Image (cartoon, rainbow, N blue to C red):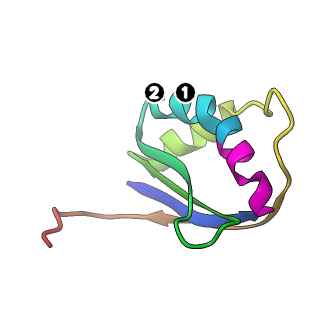
Amino acid sequence: MVIVAGKGYVDPGHRQALLSSLQASVRQTRAEPGCLDYVVAADPVEPGRVNVYERWESKEHLAAHLAAMAPPAQPTPAVLSMEIAQYEISGSEPFQI
């Protein structure tokens, strides 16, 4: 399993426009083979922060997704910075609170 997670920053006034522009690609990505979860969401505390979380069955599924990505159909608000990492996971178990 592969997890891709991180954060990005945009001008707070442009964050909603960015998230709206990504809705179709989020739906499409979630339907791709090997995609277990995919979300780009507004951070509840920092007005200009956007959180990214992806979970894929394998590196191969993630690679196929990245290879098939098309450039956005319309311009998106400029991302000021991004910090995203990829994690290879060897196992998991349910988490109890």
Say if residue 71 shows up in the picture.
yes
Horizontally, residue 13 falls left or right of residue 84, namely: right
In which quadrant is the N terminus drawn?
bottom left
Q: Could you say which quadrant of the image residue 10 lies in?
A: bottom right
User: Would you name the residue on which mark 1 appears?
Assistant: 28
Q: Which residue is drawn at the image coordinates 86% and 37% (left, top)?
A: 75
Q: Residue 86 appears in which quarter of the rendering?
A: bottom right
- Look at label 2 and name its amino acid: Ala
Percent from the top left, x then y, of residue 61? 49, 39
Magenta region includes residue 26: no
Residue drawn at x 81%, y 26% is 73
| Location of residue 51 with respect to 75 vertically, above or below | below
Q: Residues within 10 Å of mark 1 (few under 14, many from 20)?
A: few
Residue 38 location (% of width, % of height)? 48, 45
Name the element at disc 2. Answer: loop
Q: Nearer the viewer, residue 23 or 58?
A: 23
At a point 75% along the width and 62% down the height, the residue shown is 12
- In reply to whether residue 16 is colored magenta, the answer given is yes
Magenta span = 11-19
The main secondary structure of the magenta stretch is helix
Whole-angstrom CA distance, mark 2 to mark 1, is 5 Å
Name the kind of residue labelled 1 in the image.
Answer: Gln
Q: Quadrant of residue 83?
A: bottom right
Name the mark on residue 31. 2
Q: Can the viewer see residue 85? A: no
Specify the label residue 77 is tagged with: none
**Which type of secondary structure does the marked residue at label 1 adopt?**
helix
